[in-house]
Image (cartoon, rainbow, N blue to C red):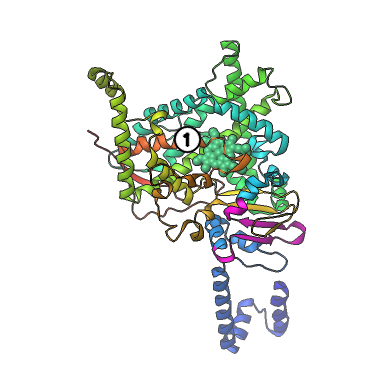
Amino acid sequence: MKRSTIHKPETKLGNMSSPSTLTFLEHYCLKTWPELFLAFLCFLSIWCLKQRKKVMTEWPVIGILPSLIANAHRIHDWTTEIANTFGATVARRAGPACMAIDFLFTCDPCNIEYIARTNFLNFPKGTEFNGTFDILGEGIFNVDDELWHKQRSMARVAMASNTFRRSVSIAASKVLGDSLLPVLASKESPSVIDLEDVLLRYTFDTSMLFIFGRNPKCLSADFPENEFQKAMENGLESVFYRHILPHPVWKLFKWLNIWKERQLKQAWKTIDQYVEQYISEKKRLDLIKGSTQAENNDILETYINFQKQESWPDHMVPKNDKFLRDAMLSLLFAGRDTVGAGLSWFFWSVCKDPRVVSKVVDELRLVYSKKQRDHSIVNEKQQQQQQQQQPWLLFDAVDLREMVYLHAALCESMRLYPPLPLNRKTPLKEDVLPDGTVARPGTMVVISTFAMGRMEWIWGKDWAEFKPERWIDAKGMLSREMQSFFTFNIGPRACLGKNVAFTLMKMAASAVLLNFHVELLAGQKVEPKSTLVLRMKNGLKVRVERRNNT
Ligand code: HEM
């Protein structure tokens, strides 16, 4: 089409000596019909502006594909706009017939409840999802049915033990006391730092400790680059783009080994090298230590012991390293970025509001003084010695239970900024959702908890306000509304690491806020990045200064 319109005038100008497109434009459009040309330009500009203002345009043949691509860089805000414009559940098609994807987007809690819990069996992740996340192999995130059942049973047993819970809080205390707080204090006071980067390093080091039993010390004063961590980031970024492009397109890119697919391939190779090394070192250490021990210090050790135990037969626990690789990588994926992102948005939300900061700090001081009273058997001299060794005010897992306001503030920030903002399902059979929407087999059902946290009809007129009080009842306890908290998913596939996540987040938030004043750098633009885990586009710049707690 384009070519023929340009071609036509060129033939008309055949008598002229070497006419260029510019001379044609000048002659015919600007000189002969300037009004017509101007009118055409105006029409084009208005049309473009109108399209930009439209939340979503459905084109013949290609459906909403142009809107999807145009909004890929702001996908989470776009889901909110879709819900506000077209309703909480919307079905659309994207891409030409041969490679079209049928989308069913929803942020309606009743529909989500139905998909995730009531008729869970009809909404697996599906084979397309498994292919998209192929880097995770057969890990818990990426499988359905029998395979998922086995992975879930194992992960549940491994994460339910007291030893595991203790190892999580020991790992967090270690990284906070030895790395995070000293790093914040080491900067010239008051110094500017990217708090998001610090928090992601904190969660990487702690997750590596309780999953693989090793501390990569990614969080230290010189902020070293870690190849394994970088590969995880690159891998996840590439997988995000697979969600935007039609399957045949990213599969073609994969085959051609170009763009994000090339990045993914390289990341995959690096990840495999590291995980292989961690597994073989752990097995070597295990051989030196001898027989199976009752207490395992990290999840990898627990899984290696599952492989040795008769109570976990071969069909449940395959006896190969690929099984260990897939399981550990999925847990690292689950724990690392989610907690780091959750914490970053928490600091952003809380530090904007001095009222909330002082309420959190008051609560922390109360819990800390109670802790000191409870340990009053320790005499003053011993206390002084302890303070010299550990100059920070730190809490342990038991203290965290009393931090109701801090817990509520974390829930509130995860309502507005859920670390996993999108979830995906594929119906097996045709189904009717509670609001009457028909979900056809093969449709990509996209659940947006990001949009859900921003709906006025769910949260009220003050939905945009940061109000931890939303989650606290008249008796000062965490309210029952918590049951409808979708950030960690609900139903049979609900997050297995919710308690771990709250432990890591509360330990870090309490340690930072009680030991430091955190001030947001004015004028910075903090907005979500289009990624699978809700990260910040430009990081979070803050000034930190030691708090005087005497
Ligand atoms: C703030 C932090 C976290 C959030 C918001 C979060 C949220 C979620 C969500 C929404 C799911 C469902 C995903 C899906 O169906 O595709 C999930 C699953 C899961 N999460 Fe978390 N998670 C967090 C931290 C963790 C941590 C720290 C761990 C463990 C170390 C963990 C372990 C898991 C596992 C194993 C699953 C898979 C459950 C299954 O498929 O049966 N999560 N999480």
Q: Quadrant of ligand 1?
A: top right
**Residue furthest out toward the right:** 98
Q: Secondary structure at mark 1?
A: helix
Q: Which residue is tagged 1? A: 203
Res. 57 image quadrant: bottom right
Q: Is residue 120 left or right of residue 230?
A: right
Res. 332 image quadrant: top right
What residue is drawn where x is 59% and y is 61%?
70
Q: Is residue 209 left or right of residue 239?
A: left
Location of residue 222 with respect to 475 vertically, above or below: above
Q: Quadrant of the N terminus?
A: bottom right
Location of residue 69 with respect to 384 vertically, above or below: below
**Residue furthest out toward the front:** 475
Location of residue 67 with respect to 349 vertically, above or below: below
Q: x and y percent of residue 403 in the render? A: 38, 37
What residue is drawn where x is 66% and y is 20%?
307
